[in-house]
Every structure is written in C-alpha cells, then in structure tokens.
Image (cartoon, helix red, strand yellow):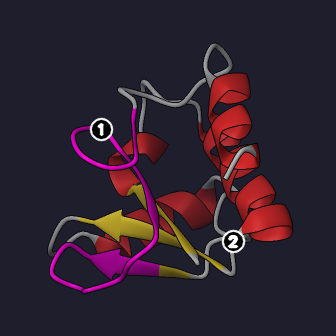
Amino acid sequence: MNLIIDATLSEPPSEIHCFRDITLYGKTFIFEDVLVLCPDGTRTIYRDWLRNHGALDFVSDLIRYKDQETGYKIHTKEGNLVIPRVGASNLDQIISVLMNL
C-alpha cells in the first residue's frame, strides 16, 4: 500500500522536519511507498524544495493529481486524514493514526 501526502503539507506553515518524520515512519514501518502529490507543473519545484531541506530521502516518487495512484491519503482538503498543516503540535496524532492502520 502507498502513503500519499499532499505536497503543500511540506510548505510553511508546516514544519519540514515533521513532514520528514512522517515519511520516515511511513516508509520504515507501514507503507511500501511514500508518494508526494503535487499540483500539475510543480514536481520539479517540490523535488528541489524537499531535497534542499533534507526531506526527500524517504519519498519514493512525486506524482501529479491526474496520476491514478491508490493508497492512504493525507491531504489538506480531501483524503483519509485531512489536516491543515504538519507540525510538532499534531505529529503525534498523525503517527498514531498511521500506527492504527
């Protein structure tokens, strides 16, 4: 199964180190692949952003909205887990939800 995370959750006001913690935990313990869902035309920008901030190492691929990948989705608007941002204040909650899958 895949973990699909909305790319905008890697941007401020989210905390990039918490975003990386989610990808680390997901890839290491639960999911086969961690995919970052990017708006059309932004994959290179997000790839560079994640690489420059040390958060690309547990990401398997960056995908577009039109790609037909299935999996557990963390998103800002629609998905299995809907959150406005990723940070120290909700990291435990996110990891807890993933642990219970």
Residue 28 located within the stretch drawn in magenta: no
From what the image shows, is residue 57 above or below residue 91? Answer: below
Q: Nearer the viewer, residue 72 or 47?
A: 72
Report crowding for label 2: few under 14, some 14 to 19, many 20 or more residues within 10 A (C-alpha).
some
The residue indicated by pointer 2 is 31
Q: Which mark is residue 76?
A: 1
- Which residue occupies the extreme front position in the image? 100
42 left or right of 81? Answer: left
Task: Give coordinates of residue 23: x percent, y percent.
Answer: 68, 58
Q: What's the amino acid at mark 2?
A: Phe
Q: Quadrant of residue 96?
A: top right
Task: State whether residue 24 is above or below residue 14.
Answer: below
Mark 1 vs mark 2: in front? 2
Q: CA distance from mark 1 to mark 2?
A: 20 Å
Q: Residue at x 39, y 30 (%)?
A: 83
Q: Which callout, 1 or 2, points at the residue further toward the start of the chain? A: 2
As helix, strand or loop, the secondary structure at mark 1 comes to loop
Question: Where are the magenta residues, as a range?
Answer: 62-82
Residue occupying image coordinates x 19% and y 65% = 39
Q: Which amino acid lies under the numbered mark 1 shown in the image of this protein?
A: Thr
Give the vertical position of 41 relative to 28 (above or below).
below
